Image (cartoon, rainbow, N blue to C red):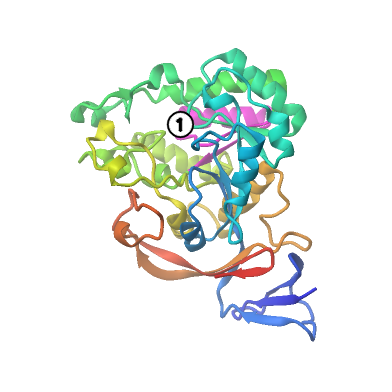
Amino acid sequence: MSMRAVINGADGQAVLIRGDRIEAVGKFDLPADAETLDAKGAIIAPGIVDLGVFAIDKPACRAGGIVRAALMPDQSPPLDDAGLIQRAADSGKPDLWVHPIAAATRGLAGLELAELATMRDSGALAVATGRSWIADSGVMRRVLAYAAPLGLTVIAHAEDGGLTANAVATAGETATRLGLPSAPATAEAMAIARDLALVEDTGAAIHFRQVTTAAGFALVRAAKARGLPVTCGITPAHLYLSDIAVSDFRTFARLSPPLRAESDREAALAALADGTIDVLCSGHDPRGPEDKRLPFADAAPGMAGAETLLALGLGLVRDGHVALSRLFELLSENPSRILGLETGTLTAGAPADLILIDRDAPWKIDTARMTARAGNTPFDGMPVQGRVLSMIKGGQPVG
C-alpha cells in the first residue's frame, strides 16, 4: 500500500497514512518510503462530518472542509426507498462521502412507516422525520420502536406543527413590529418533551437536529442527566444571530427553525459551553432567487451554510465559547458517533479523512462569490478567519 505522512511544520507533529487509514499520530520515525506533505504550520484536523444537509453541493463542501455529508431525506422524491438510498450514496463520488438518511415515513407524510430495515441494508445510517414534526404520536412511537433494534438513531425536527403552521418567525417584539405570522418559542419545547417521553418508553436513540431555545436546552440537559440516549445539534446562525436579524425583512435570515430571541441565543451559547449541544452543523440548504427574492412570508426557509461552517466555528473558538478540541468534537467526532461511523478523529486505525487549516487566514463572506449553488447566507459581508488549505479523503488528496 502507498504511504503518505502529513507533517505539521510548526511543532513537528505528524499523521502517518497507509492506504486509506491513519497508521500513526504524533511523533514517530518517518518510514523511508513515505511521501511527505508539509503542512507548513497548518492545523491538522479530522474532516468535518456535516450531520443533516439538504443538498449535495460538492464545491461548497470542499471549501468548508466537509469530507462526509449526511443527506436529509427531503429530496425529490423523498428518500423512502432502498434504491433511492443507494443512488444518493453514490452522488458524491469521488470527492465526498454521502451518507443518506432514510425517511421515517413514506413520502415524509408522517402517516405510514417507510421500510426502515431495507433502507438500512442499502446504506442508510439514520432515519429522520425530515423538515417536519410527526404530529401523530402513535406514528412517532412506531418509528422509534422500529429504529431501536435496527441500531438507527432517529433524527427529529423539534417544532410542534400545530403551533408553527403558517408561521415564519418567532413570536415576540420583532415579529409583532413587522407584522409577520409567528409561533411561540415554546413550540420547540413541546415537541422535544413529547419525543423524549416516547424515547423513555422505547429506548430508541434520538437526535434533535436543531435545538434553539432555552426551554429546549433545559429539556435535553435534564434528559441526558437521566441517562436517556438523546443528542442535539445547532447551526452557527442560532449562535450568532437573534430575530433582530430579520428586522429589514431579510429573507436570507428566514430559517427553519426561525431565529429566536436574544435570551435564547445566549442560552444556546451556554448549552454549547456546558456540553448540552453535541453537534455543530451547516444546515446547508442553498436557495436561489426564485425562492428568496420574495416577500418574507413567501420566501423559502434555509441558508447556504457548508462553506462558512468551519470559519464561523473557529470564530466561536476565538471568542472563547469553545476550545479548538471541543469544536472538532462538535464538527467531526460526535456526528460520526451518532451515525455509527468510525471516522471523525485523528487516531490510529481511523479512516484517513482529514483537513489542513490556516486558522488565521482572513476573508469576508460574500454571497456573490460563494462556491455554493446559491449564496443565501445571513452572514453576507461578515469578516471571518480560517481557510481549508487541503483535504484528504480516504487517504487521497481532494482537488
- Could you tell me the amino acid type at mark 1? Ala
Residue 127 position in % (x across, y down):
63, 33
Which quadrant of the figure has residue 104?
top right
* Region in magenta: 205-234
Q: Label 1 belongs to which residue?
A: 214
Residue placed most toward the observer, 97 or 40: 97
Residue 220 within the magenta-colored segment of the rendering: yes
Tell me: residue 222, above or below residue 97. above
Residue 211 position in % (x across, y down):
49, 34
Which quadrant of the figure has residue 179?
top left
Tell me: residue 97, above or below residue 179. below
Residue 105 position in % (x across, y down):
59, 24
Residue at left offset 45%, top offset 66%? 386
Q: Is residue 235 visible?
A: yes
Label 1 neighbourhood size at 10 Å, few (<14), some (14-19), many (20+)?
many
Give the quadrant of the N terminus: bottom right
Give the quadrant of the C terminus: bottom right
